[in-house]
Image (spheres, rainbow, N blue to C red):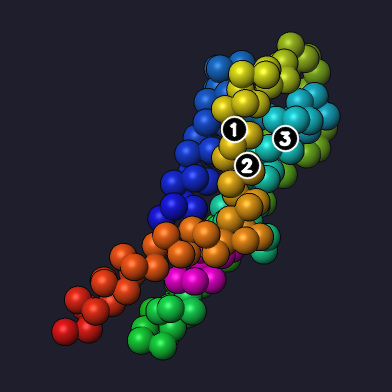
Amino acid sequence: MFSHGLLTGALFLMVGVLYDRAHTREIAAFGGLGAKIPVYTGLMVLFAMGSLGLPGMSGFVSEFMVFVGSFASFNVITALAVLGVVLTAGYMLRMVQRIFLGEFNAEKWGGLTEMNTREILMVAPLAILTIVIGVYPAPLSNILRATLENLVNVLAR
């Protein structure tokens, strides 16, 4: 849940940054923005990859822990839940392709500006946490361990 809140919050924040400049959230209206706003593109792709569960990102650790923990008791349901990971990967990659790759419409989006320092400072902690938790999740897992053990004991009765 921590990773989901982290990544979803970051993605909504990034959409808000683009909406503030373009006044639209319609994916089909964009294309090739990676050439015009590379810092924004890099951060958005980082959060999208974290959300789809790329190894080394907090989303992967979260999904892996859920799937490993639930497979022994709910193997069929867990196997079906893996389809959600596949669908997420599909729509995140499609979003990245449609917004940031391809031909840039300079006439329509030539006036777009890169993220400013304030916006970068807002998302930088989220980006750092996404990577740190993905590479070294032990501190967060240790904080949650007592609560999870209590929950398991209550549900086992």
Q: Position of residue 20 (x, y in %)?
A: 56, 17
Assign the magenta stretch its main secondary structure: helix
Start-end of magenta stretch? 60-66
Residue at 68%, 37% in the rendered image:
43
Quick one: which residue is furthest to the top in this view? Answer: 111
Mark 1, residue position: 123
Tell me the element at label 3.
Answer: helix
Quick one: which residue is furthest to the left in this view? Answer: 157
Looking at the image, residue 54 sits to the left or right of residue 59; the answer is: right
Q: Amino acid at mark 3?
A: Thr
Looking at the image, residue 40 sits to the left or right of residue 148; the answer is: right
Q: Position of residue 111 (x, y in %)?
A: 74, 11
Where the N terminus falls, by quadrant? bottom left
Mark 3, residue position: 41
34, 44: nearer the viewer? 44
Tell me the element at label 1.
Answer: helix
Label 3 or label 1, whichever comes before in sequence order: 3
Residue at 73%, 20% in the rendered image:
114
The answer to whether residue 29 is magenta is no
Establish if 81 lies above or below 110: below
Q: Amino acid at mark 2?
A: Ala
